Amino acid sequence: MEEKQNKNVEYGLKEEPSTPVEETPTKEVDTEPKKQKKSKKSCIIALLVLFFLVLLLVGAIYWSYRKVSKAMGPVDLEVEYTVEDYHNIMEELGVDIDGSLLCMDCPTPSFLDPNEVEVTVSNAQASAAFEYINQYVSVVQISDTQIKMGEGNAELSTTLSFQGQSFPVYMVGSVSKASENSLNGAVTVLKVSGFDIPVSAIPFIESALLNIANQKLVSAGDTVRIDSLEITPDGINFKGLVPTKAE
């Protein structure tokens, strides 16, 4: 270096001061806005997921409510009838007795004037007779009755109302002749408000229903006689003797 300086001096050259190299400032990348955008995007996704989960929860609750409500409601057997069906079956039987004397817990009257009959009681007629006769029951209110016959058994759907509460009842059972003035019967399915009655309780209910029916038959004395009784999809086939009047 000294040799170079000496040569410059020797030839009369003026040494130019070396220009320092300016360092180019490093441009800092501002990542903060990107982080904020990413954070906001994540929050939106989280909210959407939460909203979707809430919708699923609400949908599941609504679906469950509909299923439970449907299960607790009356079973629709698709049997339609009017009061005319009640009058028709009473006319076919030749019976002129007010329904207030025939209901399940009505006092038993004195039956008169027996009549030989052979009839097939249809679903509509059986439903109407049960509905309109038992409107006089005092313990509970009976409504929306439907009876549908099958092969050897029948379905019953009705609603019992007691102290402001309604209890839809669904029952499957059979009835047959035990003697000329008594019946046999069996209950195979019994549900109240959509819930199965315990199997252990069914025999007691079955026995109570048969007792009511057979007491009514016995009280009718010789004005009632069961020759044959059969349940078919077409209806109840009955042949025998029935009273036509009561007092």
Image: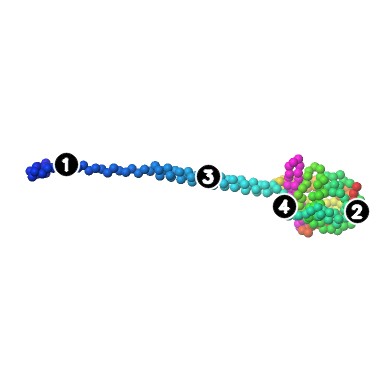
Dot 2 amino acid type: Pro
At x 59%, y 45%, the residue is: 58
- Residue 55 lies, with reference to residue 232, above or below; the image says above
Q: Earlier in the sequence, mark 4 or mark 1?
A: 1
On the image, numbered disc 2 is attached to which residue? Answer: 114
Label 3 sits on a secondary structure element that is helix
Residue 238: x percent and y percent?
84, 57
Q: State the CA–CA distance, disc 3 to disc 2.
A: 75 Å
- In front of the other: 180 or 103: 103
The answer to whether mark 4 and mark 1 are in CB contact below 8 A is: no
Q: Position of residue 98 (x, y in %)?
A: 86, 49
Tag shown at residue 76: 4
Residue found 81% across the figure and 47% down from its top:
134
Among numbered discs 3 and 1, the one appearing first in the sequence: 1
Point out which mark residue 50 bears: 3
Magenta segment includes 171: yes
Task: Decide: few, some or many residues near mark 2? Use Cα within 10 Å; few <14, some 14-19, many ≥20.
Answer: some
Residue 12 placement (x, y as % from top left): 8, 43
**Residue type, mark 4 in image:** Asp
Q: Which residue is mark 1?
A: 17
Going from N to C along the chain, the mark reached first, 4 or 2, is 4
Which residue is found at the position 86% from the left and 58% from the top?
118
Residue pushed farthest left?
A: 10
- Residue most extreme to the right: 113
Residue 165 in sight? yes
